[in-house]
Amino acid sequence: MNENNAVKNTVTKDDTKYIELNVFIKKIGLAATGGQAKTLIRSEKIMLNGVVETRNKKKIYENDVVEYENKKYSVKL
């Protein structure tokens, strides 16, 4: 993942950086478009910190772990 691109899509609120799950899915290359990311997330195949996540715009934070098909992706903002 190109960390510079991820940083451009982060939002800072109350001094806490986060990125929405659908944007992260696109940035790491699991989906080419927002629609594909949404479909993938809603398929119940994405796990966030060990729990199935189906919320498209779920805020994820530094050091969260996204898992898909037994591959883990650590969030670095």
Image (cartoon, grey):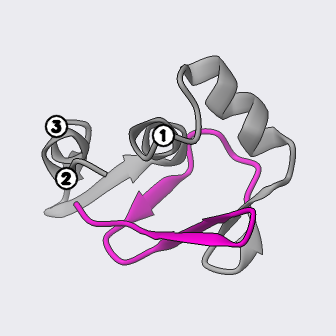
- Mark number displayed over residue 39: none
Residue linked to disc 2:
3
**For the residue carrying disc 1, how many other residues have a C-alpha within 10 Å: few (<14), some (14-19), or many (20+)?**
few
Q: Are marks 2 and 1 in contact (CB under 8 Å)?
A: no
Which residue is pictured at 19% across the width and 52% down the height?
3
Which residue is pictured at 85% across the width and 52% down the height?
44
Which residue is pictured at 52% across the width and 47% down the height?
21
Taking the image as shown, residue 3 lies to the left or right of residue 64, namely left
**For the residue carrying disc 3, how many other residues have a C-alpha within 10 Å: few (<14), some (14-19), or many (20+)?**
few
Residue that lies at the very extreme toward the right in this rendered image: 43
Of the residues under marks 2 and 3, which one precedes in the sequence?
Answer: 2
Residue linked to disc 1:
29
Which residue is pictured at 45% across the width and 74% down the height?
64
Q: Amino acid at mark 3?
A: Lys
- Mark number displayed over residue 8: 3
Q: Is residue 73 above or below residue 38?
A: below
Viewer-proximal residue, 16 or 4?
4
Report the mark closest to the observer, 3 or 1.
Answer: 1
- For label 2, the SS is helix
Q: Which residues are magenta?
A: 53-77
Q: Quadrant of residue 31?
A: top right
Of the residues under marks 3 and 1, which one precedes in the sequence?
Answer: 3
Q: How many numbered discs, if any? A: 3
